[in-house]
Amino acid sequence: MTAGCWIAGGGLPATAVISMAVNAAGDPDGATNNKTFMPVVMLLIAGVGLLAPVFVRPVTALLAAPLARFRGAGAVWRS
């Protein structure tokens, strides 16, 4: 991964968390408004999408580990 992906992938979720805290502290009733929380959700999605290449291999290995005991097509996955 490039340095830009690491920086943006860490910065976008951090910005979303800060925005959530500011919205919740400043206007708790408005924090449930679509216009308020939708940009925060989009920041979280973009940040997780940028960091996805880091998490795909470990999550796949974790999910495929129980299948390694089976024979046939279930056990074909290799790391």
Image (tube, rainbow, N blue to C red):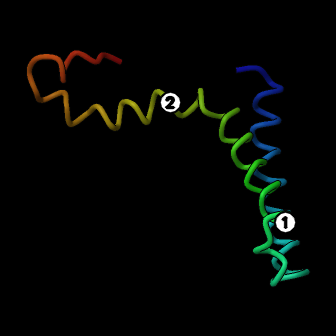
> Does 35 appear above or below 60?
below
Q: Disc 1 on helix, strand or loop?
A: helix
Q: Vertical placement of 22 versus 19: above or below?
A: below
For the point 59% across and 26% down, the residue is 53
Which of the 4 image quarters holds residue 35?
bottom right
Residue 11 position in % (x across, y down): 82, 44
* 12, above or below 16, in the image: above
- Reading the image, the residue beneath label 2 is 56
| Badge 2 amino acid | Val
Check the image and name the residue furthest to the left: 71
The image's mark for residue 46 is none
Position of the C terminus by quadrant: top left
Q: Quadrant of residue 59?
A: top left
Residue 66, percent across and down?
20, 37
Left or right of residue 27: residue 48: left
The residue carrying mark 1 is 36
- In this rendered view, identify the residue nearer to me: 38 or 72: 38
Q: Position of residue 57 (x, y in %)?
A: 46, 27
Residue drawn where x is 19% and y is 31% of the image: 67
Q: Secondary structure at mark 2?
A: helix
Mark 2 in CB contact with mark 1 (< 8 angstroms): no
Quarter of the N terminus within the rendering: top right
The reply, left or right, for residue 73 in relation to residue 59 is: left
